[in-house]
Image (tube, rainbow, N blue to C red):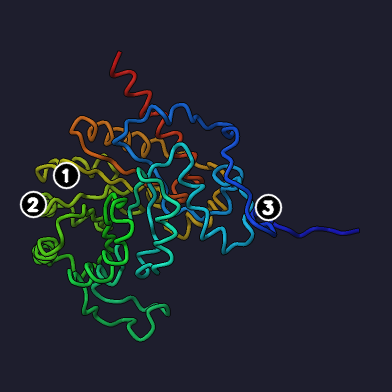
Amino acid sequence: MYISCMTRRDHDQQSLFAAGPPTGAAPGPEPPGFHFEAAQRVPATVRFGTSSWVYPGWRGLIYRRLYRSERAFRQESLAEYAAWPWFRAVGVDSTFYGPPEPSTVARWDQQLPPDFRIVPKVWEHVTIPRFPTHPRYGDQAGRLNPHFLDPELVVREVLAPLRPVADRIGALLFQLQEMPPRVLPHLDGIVKRFARFFAALPTDVRYAVEVRNPELLTPAWFEMLRDHRVAHCFNAWNRMPSLAEQRVLAEQGGGLVKDLRVLRLLTPTGLTYQESVDRFQPYDSLQVEQPQVRQDAVELLLGALDEGAESFVLVNNRLEGNSPATIDALGRMLVDRLEQIRL
């Protein structure tokens, strides 16, 4: 008797990758629990998307094609992702680890419709003051980064490779790693250094910055962002205040830039990145709802609509287990609230 030891993830990958050319993209019927009709009623200035898109666990939800290999899936699946009714944006996490290859950007250009937007992360060599002691940094591990907040590096190694898709960049995202306690007494100097950096960047691109230190969310920080037309990225993440608390802190600092809102819904409060990975993989189903995060996000979107700002809401699988399902729920909440307001 043959006893299979294939895991669910193995089965998903085997089903997703098939020999021969991929079948044509076919949206098929909407999966149970999803409401595509509501997606059509989301205001045009609100763009939902996920943090990256290459997840075999989404087979049967986002991905209906059969891809000839895992490599083909990684290279070709963005077109199918962009056809999903709820998605009009995507966060590009891979650019945090290095500039994209020209062939990669060319594939994005070919696969994305004109009205679709990407939110690429800026290469970490711009945002890390000292390289962590991690094997992937090689000889640089533990050393000071000579290119920390280097505007020329942004132009040369971040903006230049993205030029073929420049018209589809919703915003460039600077993700700052959590600063060690020894740095925190020097917040005034940090704010001034960021002010000089943002003042030196090209002005034909919109920028957002995500911080991982609550201590940085001071009136001076928000004033600096507003002066340089840089959006604060509202993030639901382990040690950060709630989205609602971040909104209050921004208001105390004089408000936000008027034309752009960026939200990244990453992990539940108090749950580390690795704990979220362990709990939610392979990201094929909604597991633990975060009602407060959802409510706070919708309130932020309603405020952005009142101000005429374009909003990007990027949801990670590690928030609730399956970001497409989270987005469906958020979108329906937003549509319902808008209909109540109109009554």
Q: What is the residue that sits farthest to the bottom in this orientation?
A: 139
The Cα–Cα distance between marks 3 and 1, rounded to whole angstroms, is 47 Å
Horizontally, residue 46 falls left or right of residue 40, namely: left
Q: Residue at x 58, y 35 (%)?
A: 31
The residue positioned 40% from the left and 69% from the top of the image is: 101
Of the two numbered discs 2 and 1 in the rendering, the one whose residue sits closer to the viewer: 2
Q: Dot 1 surroundings within 10 Å: few (below 14), some, or many (20 or more)?
A: many
Position above or below: 284 against 102: above
**Badge 2 amino acid:** Asp
Identity, as a three-letter code, of the amino acid under mark 3: Ser
Q: Which residue is mark 2?
A: 227
Residue 108 x, y percent position in the rendering: 42, 56
| Quadrant where the C terminus is found in the figure | top left
Q: CA distance from mark 2 to mark 1?
A: 13 Å
Which of marks 1 and 2 precedes in the sequence?
Answer: 2
> Which element type, helix, strand or loop, lies under badge 2?
helix
Between discs 3 and 1, the one toward the N terminus: 3
Q: Which residue is mark 3?
A: 15
